[in-house]
Amino acid sequence: MKALVHVTLKPGVLDPQGRAIQHALEGLGFQGVEDVRAGRLIELQLADDTSDETIQAMCRQLLANSVIETFRVERA
Amino acid sequence: MKALVHVTLKPGVLDPQGRAIQHALEGLGFQGVEDVRAGRLIELQLADDTSDETIQAMCRQLLANSVIETFRVERA
């Protein structure tokens, strides 16, 4: 089975990468870019019997930093 | 409006970051991790009248490297 993990910064956490992307888009002439947040997308190919709890544990222990990030798991 | 851009490496492109994550998960004792691919997730807050074509242009010009990456846009 395949699982997609979306890792995003919590609201209020400074995101210099997102800010840099926003400035670069404006520099390229794109208008109306109000905010940009950069996150990570991790595709896991797992054994079919992997439980949701195991995937959540992977996120908590390695894939996301729960102090500043939130994650969402999507089975694909 | 909000748009989510998923940027992932094309199949066949080496992914050292994904490989490192896979090894780290195995090192933590997780079993059945067959493959890991690392990508980026970019959340754009845009003016409501931004067209799909404009978002595609942002991806092609800045957000994704079309030589090695593919992207998918999701309006949220």
Image (cartoon, coloured by chain):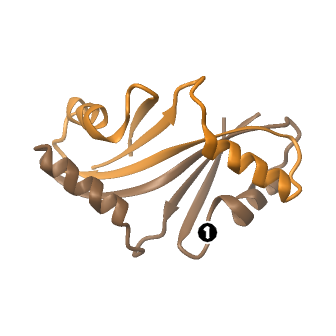
Chain colours: A orange, B brown
Question: Is residue B50 left or right of B75 when viewed as pictured?
Answer: right
Image point (84%, 59%), residue name: A28
In the rendered image, the quadrant that contains the N terminus of chain B is top right
Q: Looking at the picture, how far across and down is residue B34, in whole percent?
A: 21, 58
In the rendered image, the quadrant that contains the C terminus of chain B is top right
Q: Which residue is mark 1?
A: B65
Dot 1 falls on which chain? B
Q: Report which quarter residue A53 is drawn in.
A: top left
* SS state under label 1: loop
Q: Looking at the picture, how far across and down is residue A19, in whole percent?
A: 69, 42
Q: Residues within 10 Å of mark 1 (few under 14, many from 20)?
A: some
Question: Is residue A9 left or right of A64 when viewed as pictured?
Answer: right
Image point (81%, 57%), residue name: B53
For this rendering, which residue is in front, A11 or A54?
A11
Q: Amino acid at mark 1?
A: Asn
Q: Looking at the picture, how far across and down is residue B64, in whole percent?
A: 62, 62
Image point (89%, 40%), residue name: B49
Q: Report which quarter residue B70 is drawn in.
A: bottom right
- B76 w.r.t. B11: above or below: above
Q: Would residue B61 be visible to someone looking at this image?
A: yes
